[in-house]
Image (cartoon, helix red, strand yellow):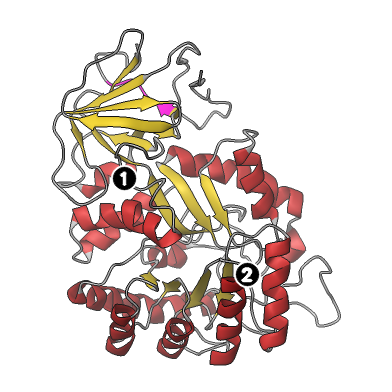
Amino acid sequence: MRVHRLIVAVLAFALVSVTAVTAGAQTIIVKAGRLIDGRGGPPIAPAMVRIGGERIEEVAASLVVPNGATIIDLGDSTLLPGLIDLHTHLTSQEGVHWENALITTTPPQAALWGARNARVTLLSGVTTSRDMGSTWPYVDVELRKAIEGGAVPGPRLVVAGSYISSTGGAGDARQFSTYLDVPLVRNMADGPDEIVKAVRTNFKNGADFIKILATGAVLSKGISPGAQQYSDAEIQAAVTEANRWGRQVAAHAHGADGIKAAIRAGVRTVDHGSYLDDTAIEMLKKSERRTFYVPTLALYAFLQAASHVPESEKERSRAVSEIAATGFKRALAEGIPIGLGTDAPVIPHGLIAREMAYRVSLGEAAMKTIVASTSLNAEILGLQDRIGSVIAGKLADLIAVRGNPLSDISVLQNVHFVMKAGTVYRAETPVGKPPIR
């Protein structure tokens, strides 16, 4: 008999109900005014979802309520699948520049902030997150283990462990005196042989996939964002080795040459993709959903307001932001599938809805944005058989908002109900009725 629990808030900033679903309940029924199931079809209104254990058993406008079932009545709210963020750095602390983290923070500090950030992210409606590597290697691996073991609440994590960068490139955070070193950090690799070893080391130490920095970055003193950092042969070496392990590669790539080199190599995602051009879009089309474009767009406004970001990097941001928006609009017009990520904490943790709203402001239909953050992102991760849509057999990852995000995408900024794999983590009381009985 499965135990369905409400996780009680232990930190003052969270708003989580204290009511607990009883251990004897074998079935949960969730009711709402409408359901957007994540697949792009018209909403079901009204909607009911029957859950047994961790999984969804049935979805319909009306269901028979079994005797003894626990009913979660969300009133006129909109029910959706749990959101998926393809680009986060959960162990990074807001307000600390990543290039300074090696000399101002510690791995235990990163782990503690990671637990905090994971909780904030989950309560915002993100039930699955792809973490793109931590400044202190493999802290994200331990965070994933802690969440899986029930030690801390957080989204289901797929982690990079430690990103791979060339010496002096976008991921070389050791921007202090050449006479100083940080022995715990070994994420630099130059040439195909070193890259193969770095890939193997990451998988040995618990990484789920590989992140490679194919171009320069905005938040870096290294090579410019538009310049290709790794050669075609180096990127290919990472993909070939990862494929031997049955794993994916995500390529940080701003510049057009780096984007195209990454697509040719067969990476799973081109992240950021700021200088996406017509040739790259055609290459993505021909890849037949082997490689996906995952922009991170809303962060540029946050960068300009950040006191810890050097002016030189704010200038890089200003140069790239409009180009990135133009590339996104070009991709929209061509109808290619576009994944969704935030790059938190560049945008603060827990603000995936801001990324979604910004995409809508650039011309994407609200339903396509929702599909991107649910079923499409699940496909990109290769987890479409488990998550990403509200259908029978999948894990019971559900969120709810008041209002209809198809008419006002901003309502997703106020998620009031979160369930991950059948366990309720957030259940604020709707006005006028108790949510759980």
Element carrying mark 2: loop
As drawn, the label of residue 389 is 1
Disc 1: CA contacts within 10 A as few (<14), some (14-19) or many (>=20):
many
Disc 2: CA contacts within 10 A as few (<14), some (14-19) or many (>=20):
many
Magenta stretch encompasses residue 228:
no
Is residue 260 visible in this depiction of the protein?
yes
Q: Amino acid at mark 1?
A: Ser
The percent coordinates of residue 282 (x first, y second) are 28, 85
Tell me the residue at 39%/79% (across/down): 320
Quarter of the picture holding the C terminus = top left
Q: In the drawing, does residue 158 fall left or right of residue 367? A: right
Residue 217 lies, with reference to residue 151, above or below; the image says below
Front position in the image: 301 or 210: 210
Tell me the residue at 60%/62% (across/down): 160
Magenta stretch encompasses residue 427:
yes
The percent coordinates of residue 107 (x first, y second) are 75, 54
Q: Residue furthest top?
A: 67
Which range of residues does the magenta coloring cover? Answer: 426-430
The percent coordinates of residue 337 (x first, y second) are 28, 67
Residue pointed to by mark 2: 163
As drawn, the label of residue 217 is none
